[in-house]
């Protein structure tokens, strides 16, 4: 009962308010007639008694247009009486001397009432048209909102806000369908805020909320309330409208009672339904988009998995088979092995396990990069020193093929030493592998404006221009290399790109004019990224790395 | 034939097996520990000549073991660590570890490091007055460096860096260690000073600055002076 008291008093207040405004309208009508009478009295010397309607009729019409049909009828009746009483002989009595005057009076009354009716009708029509225009405007705004905004997180609060403004209600809350069977409806947007709803006791309304969701039914509109007036179950506070799109209930909107406590008008009900529809569409669209993104991610993961499988089946199995064959051979009767064969088997085991190790490292590096778990550890680096580290990793015979061109005063650069050394190692390995044996590979280091630039130039067959950017994609291998059976994973350059981009630099390939490929990259001399203190640097723990690897390997 | 005792601390059985086989075959006396706690107990009962210590251990970490061992022992400690964990290596080296190896490593490399660490322990007691590497002679007594008989002019900072690196020959020294020794503890983070000095030293003392033979870089960790073979 407590709950119903505030709206009821609200109703009383508003009733007295409407009756007061009606009284004012009738007073205006009375006053108008009195004024017309007075005016006619002043000029009656100049005018014929039969011309009184010239003054009374405008009053009736103005009343009809401005105040409505009721006051206009009052004005018509008043005019009828005043004309008769004051201006038709015998003056000051109800009697009418001349029967023709009776005719005038009757005709006047009929005309006045008919005119008032027409004018009042025009008035209500105008008002309705205005209301419809307002409704259309709100709807228009709402549909614009959902077409412009993409994020449901922003659409839903905006729609709620509009509902509150357009229907002048105390509050409005939008609930979204539960994410799973175990969870309940969740609040997606509330206007003005939770406190308003907290003040209103909604304990009995929870069942309306749930019913509205499960039964896809609307509660609280005038038609339903009267039908479902149940003495045990109190009527809902405001209205509950299910949000239905694609035949699925996406949530519920709860619109609180109007500020003036009166039931919603038909146009307002229509508006609430239309806005609820928009909210439902927005939610449905979001879930479609989510599903599409998920499907896309799954497809990509699937592709990655199959590429990885084919890579594993070849690049991992070949060295493994070689190691297994050599090692199990060595376990056989040792007298059968001569010195040279023994050496060969041992070298095979050593080299092939290095190859396996290299592949595992590359896979890990790439997954760490892609998961953002391998962030640069900023430090001042001497690129000659970095290049030296890369050269030291190569077999001595291969390293000797590399010519280094660097000015003696090359400035330091802010970068991750280990990562850039990895980039140079990968680029050098490729350059040496894909160019004729014993041919030279040149590394040029130089300052270029605010950057340091590195070129790795080989004398191989170059890269077809249409593939120049694709070579940086993971698992991408040139068709010619794939066909020629050269071992390779298509991971090295993807790692290079990942590292250089994390440094805010660029990496690209352009063939040399006389053939051969030139892989270049730049590093900003003073990094755009704020240099971090060592203590703040994230240390990538094993779990992170393994976690990152798993997401990429198992998709 | 060395009969020195080596304590191997690693939680992975395969690594313990491989190291025991490889080290025993070279005449070392191998003691195995699976955890840090076990390693500390064993080191107290049977003091080893050298400890090979994996950094990622269940229970107390390798770093902790390193720190605890250093409280009462100056036994050489060789760290084994996973790839991409430079910070762990630097921490362990700053805690007093002598050297590190990144898994997977070759037995040849491990044996070379073990020999260098054991040798260094002996040579530390008898500091040399001069050092010869390649065509360079360093005369510590007179603070003179010559190359092919001609004097090489080194700045004070260059000489101090060279002196510190050669004094710790065949051992990794971290950036922090060199910086705080040469520039003072308040400059222990200013790696750019060090980069510049190392670059100049190489230009003056190495044949090929991009392929240094003696002043080696330990990526992400520090530097190492490699004694001539």
Image: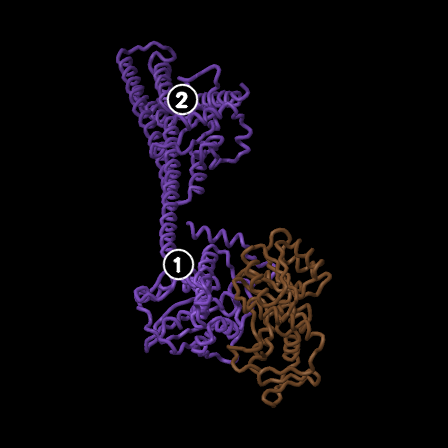
Q: Closer to the N terminus: mark 2 or mark 1?
A: 2
Q: Which residue is mark 2?
A: A222
Across and down, in percent, residue A131 comes to: 36, 32
Residue A269 visible from this viewpoint: yes
Chain in brown, by letter, is: B
Q: Nearer the viewer, mark 2 or mark 1?
A: 1
Q: Residues within 10 Å of mark 1 (few under 14, many from 20)?
A: few
Q: Secondary structure at mark 1?
A: helix
Q: Residues within 10 Å of mark 2 (few under 14, many from 20)?
A: some
Residue A495 visible from this viewpoint: no
C-alpha separation, residue under disc 2 versus residue under disc 1: 75 Å
Question: Residue A150 appears in which quarter of the rendering?
Answer: top left
* Chain A, hue in figure: purple
The reply to the same-chain question for discs 2 and 1 is yes
Q: Which residue is mark 1?
A: A317
Q: Secondary structure at mark 2?
A: helix
Question: Is A38 placed above or below A487 here?
Answer: above
Question: Residue A159 appears in which quarter of the rendering?
Answer: top left
Across and down, in percent, residue B194 comes to: 60, 73
Numbered disc 2: what chain?
A
């Amino acid at each position: 009962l407590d709950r119903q008291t505030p709206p009821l008093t609200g109703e009383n207040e508003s009733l007295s308010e409407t009756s007061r405004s009606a009284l004012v309208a009738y007073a205006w009508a009375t006053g108008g007639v009195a004024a017309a009478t007075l005016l006619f009295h002043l000029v009656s010397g100049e005018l014929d008694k039969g011309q009184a309607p010239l003054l009374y009729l405008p009053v009736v019409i103005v009343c009809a247009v401005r105040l409505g049909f009721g006051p206009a009828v009052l004005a018509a009746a008043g005019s009828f009486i005043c004309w008769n009483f004051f201006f038709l002989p015998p003056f000051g009595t109800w009697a009418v001397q001349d029967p023709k005057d009776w005719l005038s009076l009757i005709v006047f009354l009929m005309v006045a009432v008919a005119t008032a009716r027409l004018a009042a009708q025009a008035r209500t029509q105008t008002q309705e048209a205005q209301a419809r225009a307002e409704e259309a405007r709100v709807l228009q705004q709402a549909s614009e909102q959902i077409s412009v905004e993409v994020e449901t997180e922003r659409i839903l609060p905006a729609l709620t806000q509009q509902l509150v403004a357009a229907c002048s209600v105390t509050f409005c809350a939008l609930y979204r369908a539960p994410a799973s069977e175990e969870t309940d409806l969740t609040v997606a947007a509330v206007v003005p805020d939770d406190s308003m709803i907290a003040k209103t006791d909604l304990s009995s309304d929870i069942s309306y909320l749930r019913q509205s969701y499960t039964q896809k039914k609307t509660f609280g509109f005038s038609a339903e309330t009267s039908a479902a007036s149940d003495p045990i179950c109190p009527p809902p506070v405001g209205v509950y409208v299910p949000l239905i799109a694609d035949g699925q209930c996406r949530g519920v909107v709860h619109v609180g009672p109007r500020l003036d406590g009166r039931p919603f008008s038909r146009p307002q009900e229509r508006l609430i339904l239309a806005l609820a529809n928009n909210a439902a569409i927005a939610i449905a669209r979001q879930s479609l988009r989510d599903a599409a993104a998920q499907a896309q991610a799954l497809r990509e993961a699937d592709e990655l998995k199959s590429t990885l499988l084919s890579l594993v089946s070849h690049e991992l199995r070949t060295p493994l088979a070689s190691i297994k064959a050599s090692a199990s051979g060595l376990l056989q009767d040792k007298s059968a092995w001569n010195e040279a064969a023994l050496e060969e088997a041992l070298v095979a085991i050593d080299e092939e396990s290095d190859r396996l190790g290299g592949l595992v490292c590359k896979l890990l590096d790439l997954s760490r990069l892609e998961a953002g778990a391998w962030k640069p550890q900023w430090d001042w680096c001497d690129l000659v020193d970095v290049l030296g580290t890369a050269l030291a990793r190569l077999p001595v015979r291969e390293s000797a093929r590399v010519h280094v061109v660097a000015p003696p005063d090359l400035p330091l650069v802010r970068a991750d030493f280990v990562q850039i050394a990895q980039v140079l190692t990968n680029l050098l390995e490729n350059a040496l592998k894909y160019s004729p044996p014993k041919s030279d590979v040149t590394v040029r280091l130089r300052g270029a404006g605010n950057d340091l630039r590195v070129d790795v130039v080989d004398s191989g067959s170059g890269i077809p221009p249409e593939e120049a950017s694709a070579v940086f994609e993971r698992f991408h291998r040139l068709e010619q290399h794939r066909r020629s059976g050269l071992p390779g994973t298509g991971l090295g350059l993807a790692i290079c790109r990942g590292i250089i981009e994390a440094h805010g630099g660029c990496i690209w390939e352009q063939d040399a004019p006389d053939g051969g490929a030139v892989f270049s990259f730049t590093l900003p001399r003073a990094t755009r990224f704020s240099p971090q203190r060592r203590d703040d640097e994230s240390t990538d723990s094993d779990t992170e790395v393994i976690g990152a690897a798993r997401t990429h390997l198992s998709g | 034939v060395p009969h020195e005792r080596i304590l191997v601390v690693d939680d992975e059985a395969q690594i313990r097996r491989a190291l025991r086989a490889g080290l025993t075959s070279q005449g070392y006396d191998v003691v195995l520990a699976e955890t840090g706690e076990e390693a500390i107990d064993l080191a107290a009962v049977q003091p080893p000549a050298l400890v090979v210590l994996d950094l990622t251990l269940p229970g107390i970490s390798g770093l902790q073991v390193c720190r605890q061992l250093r409280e009462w022992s100056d036994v050489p400690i060789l760290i084994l660590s996973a790839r991409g964990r430079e910070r762990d290596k630097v921490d362990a080296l700053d805690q007093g570890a002598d050297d590190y190896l990144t898994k997977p490593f070759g037995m040849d490399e491990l044996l070379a490091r073990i020999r260098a660490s054991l040798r260094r322990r002996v040579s530390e007691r008898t500091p040399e007055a001069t050092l010869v590497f390649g065509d360079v002679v360093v005369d510590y007594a007179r603070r003179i460096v010559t190359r092919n008989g001609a004097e090489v002019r080194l700045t004070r900072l260059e000489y101090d860096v060279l002196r510190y690196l050669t004094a710790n020959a065949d051992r990794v020294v971290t950036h922090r260690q060199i910086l705080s020794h040469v520039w003072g503890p308040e400059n222990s983070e200013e790696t750019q000073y060090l980069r510049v000095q190392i670059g100049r030293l190489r230009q003056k003392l190495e044949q090929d600055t991009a392929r240094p033979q003696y002043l080696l870089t330990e990526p992400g960790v520090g530097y190492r002076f490699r004694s001539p073979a």
